Image (cartoon, helix red, strand yellow):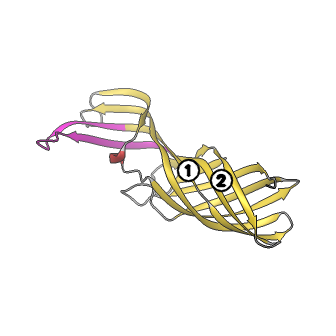
Amino acid sequence: MNIANITKVDNSKVRPGLTVGLEGEYGVTEKFGVTAGFFYSQQGVKADNIELEAGWFDENTDELVGAWAYRGKATYKLDYINIPIMAQYYLIPGLAVKAGIQPGFNTLKRIALNGTLYQGGVLGENERTIDESYKLGKSDGIKSFQFAIPVGLSYEYKNFVLDARYNIYLTKAFKYGEGRHSVFAFTLGYKFAL
């Protein structure tokens, strides 16, 4: 389970999501190991009472062709393939602290809107209620690569592993603005020897 958010987004709330994948560990010593994983991670943010505006231009004349404005709720659904590479140290048998690096690659960019759309780009005019989801493109400013430092704890009991980690993102989520992903991830897995 993920508890995801993006910092510096007005009126933001967490977006709960799933994280699922595989992770392998190589034991260097009895107390020290290195892990590498491959996870699908649902991230993003929910926001209430937001206002968005957009316009599009003629390619030949650069004249404004159309515009819209929006007021209401929005959910950014941003999913990634994350590849954590971590060092872990066992404090006692079964209990490990861990830290490392994590590149992430965007696989899904959607926005769900539930509110009022104003065609023509002026709030309060030509309005209609919408509850729809839209695919976002390259021009929407969402970065396709993310880099994080994951830190966490894990506990193993009879081959079941409970893992809790927080991902500290060094890259911005959007090309414009300062917001960064903020993700707590909790996983339950089963460990077996290869």
The CA distance from mark 2 to mark 1 is 14 Å
| Residue under the image location 59 percent in, 48 percent down | 41
* Image location of residue 71, percent across then percent down: 38, 38
Instruction: Locate residue 168: give its quadrant.
Output: bottom right
Query: In the rendered view of the protein, which quadrant contains the C terminus?
Result: bottom right
Magenta-colored span? 46-70
Q: What residue is shown with label 1?
A: 81
| Residue under the image location 44 percent in, 52 percent down | 144
Q: Is residue 69 magenta?
A: yes
Q: Secondary structure at mark 1?
A: strand
Report the side of 26 relative to 92 (left or right): left
Say few, some or many: other residues with alpha carbon within 10 Å of mark 1 (under 14 / 14 to 19 / 20 or more). many
**94 above or below 11?**
below
Q: Secondary structure at mark 2?
A: strand
Instruction: Locate residue 64: give its quadrant.
Output: top left
The chief SS type of the magenta part is strand
Nearest the camera: 105 or 118? 105
Q: Earlier in the sequence, mark 2 or mark 1?
A: 1
Nearest the camera: 134 or 159? 159
Figure label count:
2
Kind of residue at badge 1? Ile
